[in-house]
Image (cartoon, coloured by chain):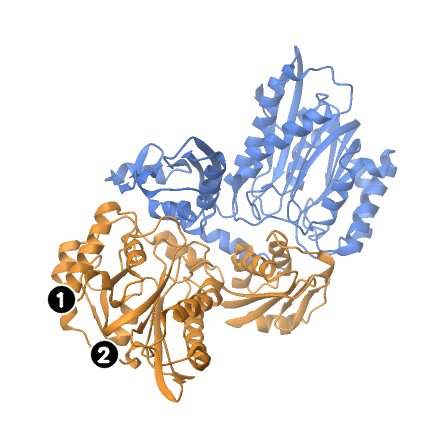
Chain colours: A orange, B blue
Amino acid sequence: MDKISGGLENVRGFTFSAIKCGIRYSDRIDYSLILSDSLCNAVGVFTTNKITAAPVKLCRERINNKIKAILINSTNANACTGHEGLQNAKGLTEDIAKRIGVSPESVLMASTGIIGRQLPYEKMLSSHDELIANLDRNNGQAMARAIMTTDTIPKEVAASFTVNGEKFYIAGIAKGAGMIAPNMATLLSFILTDAPIEKNYLDYTFRKFIKKTFNSITIDGDMSTNDSAIILSPDFPSPFKEDQLADFEEALLFVLDSLAQLIVYDAEGATKSVKIRTIGAATDDDADKIARAVSQSLLVKTAIFGNDPNWGRIVCAAGYSGADINESTLSVYVEDIPLFVKGSPTEQDLKELESVLKRRNYTITIDVGLGNGESIMWTSDLSFDYVKINAEYST
Amino acid sequence: MDKISGGLENVRGFTFSAIKCGIRYSDRIDYSLILSDSLCNAVGVFTTNKITAAPVKLCRERINNKIKAILINSTNANACTGHEGLQNAKGLTEDIAKRIGVSPESVLMASTGIIGRQLPYEKMLSSHDELIANLDRNNGQAMARAIMTTDTIPKEVAASFTVNGEKFYIAGIAKGAGMIAPNMATLLSFILTDAPIEKNYLDYTFRKFIKKTFNSITIDGDMSTNDSAIILSPDFPSPFKEDQLADFEEALLFVLDSLAQLIVYDAEGATKSVKIRTIGAATDDDADKIARAVSQSLLVKTAIFGNDPNWGRIVCAAGYSGADINESTLSVYVEDIPLFVKGSPTEQDLKELESVLKRRNYTITIDVGLGNGESIMWTSDLSFDYVKINAEYST
């Protein structure tokens, strides 16, 4: 595979529209549409929160149909809006379906923004003329911007790959910034490819890679009501055998991983993105517990913000993670600098250590010393600005 | 029972000493001793972290002996200090035991402070003359000060109670401030009574009340390596039957509950302490899961800091708590003002709501609407100062 510049506009067979509808604010691009030329196989991974937004309920009903379009709004989550909220999502997608000449069952919807407000249904409906009129393949980056809320940069990634000698494209966009927990960590992400991929295989591969990417990042441990990651691939008879799809897999993983990294990089108020690598755990499951506990510890995250080599807080979080752990076999490293080796603190060159801790990216390794279990998580630091952003976000 | 002023000095049969030893800083009261005139029954509840400090290991070995003294230091946790750390704790308690004429098995130790540094053993040993010389019943409040780290106020509570017509005293001290998770939430707490209480009953009652008090508060969700709550009662044959101890139980619960409240009140950087009350859950266990998830959500805690009636974040945290929950039966109140009733947002008088949210203390009630399960947790808000304190705490 090859990384390429730009985003969704690289993928053949799709057009995009992103407009200012005025859903919550008067001057923001907040309403957008992804339209496929042909019907698509779709796979969606949604929040595991038991309170789900209306668009998530609608997607769960429709995701196994052939999909033609995804309607997306920002600034209003359409969550905790009851029967009326679900009817609004249905009504809006029905109108789009009529305009593009497909069954409503072929149109998905995703929303992000404030919880507990009804969508301005009539206003949105009356913007559909403009939304459809603006559809254009070159609006790829506008899509990445349209789904932002507290994000500071649009997140788009694209790659080309080869299957059986033929060149294809894959690209994705995502929004993150806050309410990012290590289960379905993205708020919204949409991945498109022009390669026709058989549905069961697409489902298996997408879920497997989501686990390694979006589900391995944490910002604040809060799991949203709206988390949705959806992939579309044209529903043509797939000419490819699974053993020809290595380059597709590599490209899909690259796109998901890059988007996940961008989300951590752009975490609310973050000044750092740090890889938490656990090795030597009794099992992979234990490694995962440790990586998650360390990644989510407020004391670890504030220490990262303060450039403080506080391995005590890392050991402490590992200790309460629930994993098997033994002080006398446990070691902690920042990059390759040992801070704590098999139960004993080390003497470090503080200058060298400080220069690593001041970097924007580095790796903390926790070697449990009990087995071969491994796990990787990505976390951000907890800064003044995280508090500021989330205390001042007004209901 | 009656609440009385002051702290440990109210309890007959104990003396206290608190001195400046210079363990980490030159001018701080950092080393202290509780001495009982007679041997005591002791119950200890310790951290469930798998990485435990040396003094916790020592206490777990000795807690079922008859106890005469507790040696306490602040500014150094003696955690992650391996064999040497445990030997230091043993050596220091042995020297104290020799000086007060008991077996080392009758002396407990507790430490709080930075993780991963060896105690200055010789310096501490050479201060034992002064430590013993200063023992005095009137040093109760000095004890409360000696165990502080980032606490801004000493925490001491006292009460008198009556058993079978006879008057007794109970008092406790605690330190908290940070690394406070909802399991053994205090870092250190010591409770003394002059009533002789039979050991098994003391054990049962103390653990039961710890669950309702120290284990029902959360500041940052981090569970320390040093958490220890210890109660001492003189080992005289107890003349009391269990049905005569209602006033003792009330006084013990009062002391533990008051200390827990003081810890939340004095949470690192906190401007609020908020009661999270869950009712109507399918089970008490489910109510507990919801109260904990809401109490620990960074988004809820920053909203509390920002005086923002963001019930969406509360509903969201309830949704990912793992408890049974149904949007259409769920309601959220601030004091008695409904924000969300059976799945629908309400219209609120924003002025009235704002006046409640600006208070230092208020109650958020989550009514799940599914059964009779109930739970209460206490949480603090997440402020700029929490980040500042924890980013600047230097390793």
- x and y percentages locating residue A189 in the rendered image: 35, 66
Q: Between marks 1 and 2, how big is the CA–CA gap?
A: 18 Å
Which residue: 43% across, 79% down? A245
Drawn side of residue B231 relative to residue B261, left or right: right
Helix, strand or loop at label 1? It is helix
Residue A392's spot in the image, x, y percent? Answer: 35, 53
Residue type for callout 1: Arg
Q: Which mark is residue A99?
A: 1
Q: Do marks 1 and 2 share a chain?
A: yes
What chain letter is assigned to the residue under label 2?
A: A
Question: On the picture, is B74 further left or further right than B214?
Answer: right
The percent coordinates of residue A201 (x first, y second) are 41, 71
Q: Of the residues shown, which amino acid type is indicated by label 2?
A: Arg
Q: Is residue B310 visible?
A: no
Residue picked out by circle 2: A137
Q: Is residue B245 above or below residue A213?
A: above
Q: Is residue A9 above or below residue A344?
A: below
Chain of residue at mark 1: A
Foreground pick, B101 / B130: B101
> Which is nearer the N-term, disc 1 or disc 2?
1
